Image (tube, rainbow, N blue to C red):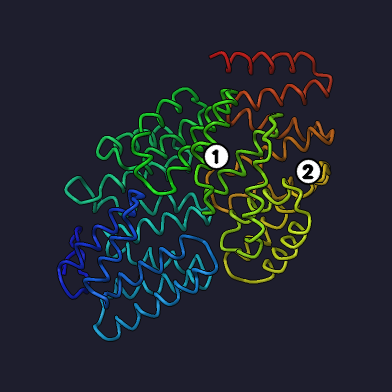
Amino acid sequence: MLDARGLETTAANDAAVRNFDATIAQYLRFGTETGDCLKRTLAEDPGMALAHCLKGYFFMLFCLPALVVKARASLDAGRRAAGERGATDRERRHLDALDAWIRGEFEQAVAHLEAILADHPRDVLALRLAHYLHFYLGDDENLRDSIGRVLHAWDDTVDGYGYVLGMHAFALEEWGACDEAERTGRSAVERNPADLWAVHAVAHVMEMQDRRPEGVAWIRESEPRLGECNNFGYHLWWHLALFHLELEDVESVLRLYDERMRADLSDEYLDICNATSMLWRLEERGVDVGDRWNELGQRCEARTGDHQLVFADVHYMLALAAGGREAAVDRMLDDVSAFAEGAATEQVVMRSAGVPLARAIVHWYRGEYAQVVDVLAPVRYRLPLIGGSHAQRDLFHQLLIAAALGSGRYETARTVLSERAARKPRNPWTWKRYARALAALDDDEGAAQARETAARLLAG
């Protein structure tokens, strides 16, 4: 059988392939019908190897240890199906990629996916999953080039081309090619307004360039579609709240937090990361967040031993430490230290960057600001290893700056803020803290100029 992009697919009937195509389309648009489409695929063909593999991929994307067991069962079902009916080399490679991912070998998994793409550049499932893994490997270069390597095989005649452009836009933004990223992202959205990953890519450009009012308007344009997607919509609400925060519109931030970001109190890892990072930013700015940490802390107490993504683990630690859950904090410090002794992908990342970052978070909430600087400053250039976007990881750079100011390490604060001002010259938060550091170092003229710059940017 041939799928929507002309790829040979082993299946019992055409209905199974069409439902599989629908599953992929839903996945690419963060659709709420993704799971139902996959169920219909397997109902049409219970022995479709690639459908079982896709089910396993979906389990892994939830980043829950309990679902890794189910992913392994899906892998086993896929391999049985391939053995009984036969499978293409592409399908067997997908099963190998899932196997490596389950074993925690991200580099091996993405190598299998890239091998698929070398022979089958229109395999949009392999492309999207490679995009995800490069992102959480912190590999901006391959995030960009993974898309670039297959663009020759895509154009408007190929189903799903707009989604490929959306992925390319995000990869370009993370690489730093913001102007090209925005053009590509807008082109993707023009082709398909439901492509929220492309909307997200353009929002990232606006965040990196501190185009705050434009960012608010851009996301508001897509508001009707946010209610039609899965939990990824909460992440776009996070971006909207971030723009409002940079505009110092705290009331809007808290309203978005309560009515959008945490409306259903989701325990999905990205939703927790969104919430914890926003509350930290609010508190650092002197905002009373009430009892909002309590709900997050309760959810994170059950996840101290997850270790599916270091990026998620450090955000769980943030919720526990912020909520004063000392027993859980100590338990998680022990857990991450033990986990860091292994050799799988995230274990190595935990050892290199995750453990120091977790310790820095704990020091922060214990008021040990000098220790935050001592632990975090030496590893700040390793932070991309934990994955996530520049906008998401910026939280930890802000943590370092705030700790340097809080501990009287004004020379360190000046150095890091000087770097930041060169990189984000239109960011009022940066200039306000730069003014504090310069004033503490008796640079009254520099401090006055920094304050004036912050005021001018906010007024503008």
Q: Identify the residue at horizontal 42%, vertical 77% (top origin).
A: 73
The CA span between labels 1 and 2 is 21 Å
Camera-side residue of 374 and 175: 374
Location of residue 17 by image quarter: bottom left
From this view, report whether residue 160 is shown above or below residue 336: above
From this view, report whether residue 231 is shown above or below residue 2: above
Q: Mark 2 points at which residue?
A: 373
Res 124 label: none
Q: Identify the residue at horizontal 65%, vertical 53% (top origin).
A: 298
Estimate the x, y position of residue 52 in percent, counting from the top left.
34, 72
Q: Identify the residue at horizontal 28%, vertical 59% (top origin).
A: 23
* Quadrant the N terminus occupies: bottom left
Q: Name the residue under label 1.
A: 391
From this view, report whether residue 418 is shown above or below residue 131: above
- Left or right: 117 in relation to 363: left
| Badge 1 element | helix
Estimate the x, y position of residue 188 in percent, counting from the top left.
30, 39
Disc 1 residue crowd, few under 14, some 14–19, many 20+, Cα 10 Å: some
| Badge 2 element | helix
Estimate the x, y position of residue 208 in percent, counting from the top left.
51, 33
- Left or right: 6 in relation to 314: left
- Left or right: 450 in relation to 270: right
Camera-side residue of 151 and 34: 34
